[in-house]
Amino acid sequence: MMIKVKIPATSANMGAGFDCLGIALGLYNYVYAEETDGGLNIEIRDESANYLPTDERNLVYRSMQEVFDRVGYRTAGLHLILENNVPVTRGLGSSSAGIVGGLLAANELCEAGLSADELLDMAARIEGHPDNVAPAILGGITINASSRRKIRHVKAEVPKDLKFAAFVPDFPLPTKKSREILPKSVSLHDAAFNTGRCALLLTSIMTGHYENIRIGVEDRLHQRFRKRLIPHIDDLFRQAYRSGALGVYLSGAGPTVVAIIKAGDKSFEPRMRGYLRRYMNNWRLHILNADNVGAAACKIQMEVN
Ligand code: HSE
């Protein structure tokens, strides 16, 4: 019996919501897992095979072990097939997708029956922060806060008339590096600036006041420091706004940039593709829907080949 898990990409922070806001996007990783008589066999079926480990250090495998250890389950061997469409180390939640994929695969495989909340607490502990793992598990936009080692969260459905343009460069930016450059303290003024905008962003998306999104994504806690690590990013922001974006922000720790656009906007994509071709041809554009469902695991009969 094979387990299949589908896990969405995620975009954390959304500008003002540093470490507390995230959204699930319609770009997916797949984990296939089955028990075997012995050993560990991990196949990665995309170019991330060139740099992700396929032994006990693999994040999907390590996350599966967390579930097995928690419920006292032992496997003789495991066969995993990983299809990674979420670009690695680009700010679209690839490590969260790996963690969530592993946790859900193991939960289904050994019928551990762990709830979404339990899986979320485990995932946030492994990842170190909850803002990518929450939308990866639950879908939609999630708002979360850690309290007494538990993640308090709310999921909101993303309106269907919004789309998300993800601009992904050909270079990675490790989250560790992108966090190390942040200041250790911020002014009361900057904290208040972000608090108000985060609330404005969320309520404006939920109530259809899309004219507020541009202000709502503004941030003073992380983006200006991180932008220094990403060449020509201010030009990209400016061009996206000129082309009709409702709001533009650095996705997670970067370097991906996400522009929120109206679903009916016909000119944004061709204009931005033209711009990238001319001035930033090491960047790729993916026009994505939000994912309001989140990660899902099921048993499948068929052979995967
Ligand atoms: N909230 C985190 C950060 C997301 O901005 O560092 C990183 O994946």
Image (tube, grey):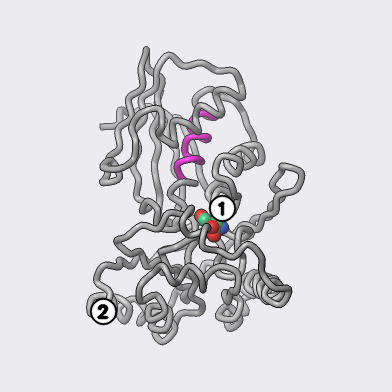
Q: Percent x, y for residue 158?
A: 57, 64
Image quadrant in which you'd find residue 254:
bottom left
Part of the protein shown in magenta: 97-107
Q: Is mark 1 within 8 Å of ligand 1?
A: no
Q: Is residue 151 left or right of residue 92?
A: right
- Residue 23 in sight in this render: no
Residue drawn at the location 44% of the way across and 58% of the way down? 91
Is ligand 1 within 8 Å of the beta carbon of the residue shown at mark 2?
Answer: no
Three-letter residue code for mark 1: Pro
In the rendered image, residue 167, in percent from the top left (x then y), is placed at 37, 68
Name which residue lies at 62% across and 65% down: 17
Instruction: Check residue 135 in the rendering and tell me which mark sits there, or answer none.
Output: 1
Q: Earlier in the sequence, mark 1 or mark 2?
A: 1
For the point 34% across and 40% down, the residue is 52
- Mark carried by residue 279: 2
The answer to if 100 sits in the magenta stretch is yes
Q: Nearer the viewer, residue 202 or 61?
A: 61
16 lies above or below 239: above
Residue 280: quadrant of the picture: bottom left
252 up-or-down from 208: above or below = above
